[in-house]
């Protein structure tokens, strides 16, 4: 059985770092490639791994903050320039479907010129994909702080933000996306072989306190700030003695069944 991999293409927080891309993670299941989020710098990071854009099979977006979605049009352009012929599906929060369909022609990515069929699929919480693996979207409250301005000025945004639970049949992975508080993910961690968790929008002490009491093979902290912030996180982890929590770095690869 071929081994699967999680390849970290971008691990920076929403404040871009000069040496790291923002959020982007490549899931390799057998020979198939799935991209989870596509933030700034992810396209170049993809190429630095020696990967061919034409081999990318599907893209999943957790929410539409720029550091998670801003290079999606560029990735689509790369697929075109690489000569892709097979259909590709981009899974985005349902609120983003019409905006994306309007935006792509504005940057001259006309469907009629693409060499492949581009399927833009809007999803809501629940089952999103169930072919080579199962991916379930779990709603979180990362965007709820925008409710006031949305209501005041009549924006159409629906504050749709998600975590992803992925089951390959042999292994379970959890990707937090960005969250509002630790409560968004507390009940979804147990039983995962890999938990890829952002480190910016909650009190890390909550995770460090809970981690020894739940069954997770490896925690990977991502969405990281500058070197000083990473060093501070390392120190806090070391003081706990917990040995299954690591900080992410660009190019990191995790092999699993």
Image (spheres, grey):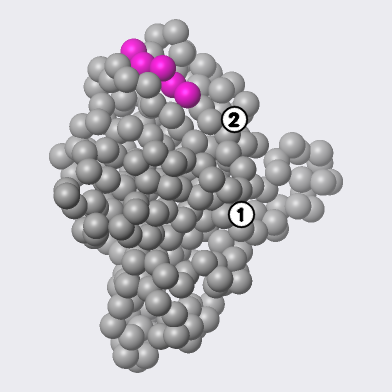
Residue displayed at 56% across by 61% down: 179
On whether residue 118 falls in the magenta region, the answer is yes
> Residue 184 lies in what quarter of the image?
bottom right
Q: Is residue 197 left or right of residue 103?
A: left
Residue displayed at 53% across by 77% down: 203
Q: Is residue 76 left or right of residue 188?
A: left
Residue 50: x %, y % from top left: 15, 39
Q: Which stretch is magenta?
A: 115-119
Residue 57: x %, y % from top left: 33, 32
Q: Which quarter of the figure is the C terminus placed in?
A: bottom left
Residue 141: x %, y % from top left: 65, 59
Residue 139: numbered disc:
1
Residue displayed at 36% across by 16% down: 116
Residue 177: x %, y % from top left: 49, 56
Q: Nearer the viewer, residue 167 or 9?
A: 167
Decide: is 120 above or below 126.
above
Q: Earlier in the sequence, mark 1 or mark 2?
A: 2
């Amino acid at each position: 059985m071929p081994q699967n991999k999680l390849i970290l293409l971008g691990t920076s927080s929403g404040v871009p770092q000069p040496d790291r891309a923002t959020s982007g993670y490549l899931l390799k299941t057998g020979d198939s490639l799935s991209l989870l989020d596509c933030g700034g710098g992810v396209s170049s990071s993809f190429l630095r791994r020696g990967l061919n854009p034409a081999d990318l099979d599907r893209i999943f977006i957790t929410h539409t903050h720029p550091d998670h979605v801003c290079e999606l049009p560029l990735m689509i352009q790369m697929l075109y320039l690489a000569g892709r012929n097979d259909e590709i599906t981009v899974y985005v929060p349902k609120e983003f479907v019409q905006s994306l369909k309007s935006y792509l022609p504005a940057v001259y990515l006309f469907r009629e010129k693409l060499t492949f069929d581009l399927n833009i699929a809007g999803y809501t919480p629940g089952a999103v994909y169930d072919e080579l693996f199962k991916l379930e979207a779990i709603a979180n409250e990362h965007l709820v702080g925008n409710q006031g301005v949305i209501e005041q000025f009549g924006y159409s945004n629906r504050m749709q933000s998600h975590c992803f639970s992925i089951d390959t049949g042999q292994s379970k992975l959890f990707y937090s996306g960005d969250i509002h508080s630790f409560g968004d993910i507390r009940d979804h961690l147990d039983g995962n072989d890999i938990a890829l968790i952002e480190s910016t929008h909650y009190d890390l002490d909550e995770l460090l306190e809970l981690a020894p009491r739940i069954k997770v093979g490896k925690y990977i902290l991502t969405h990281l700030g500058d070197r000083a912030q990473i060093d501070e996180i390392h120190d806090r982890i070391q003081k706990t003695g917990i040995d299954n929590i690591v900080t992410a770095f660009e190019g990191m690869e995790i092999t699993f069944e």
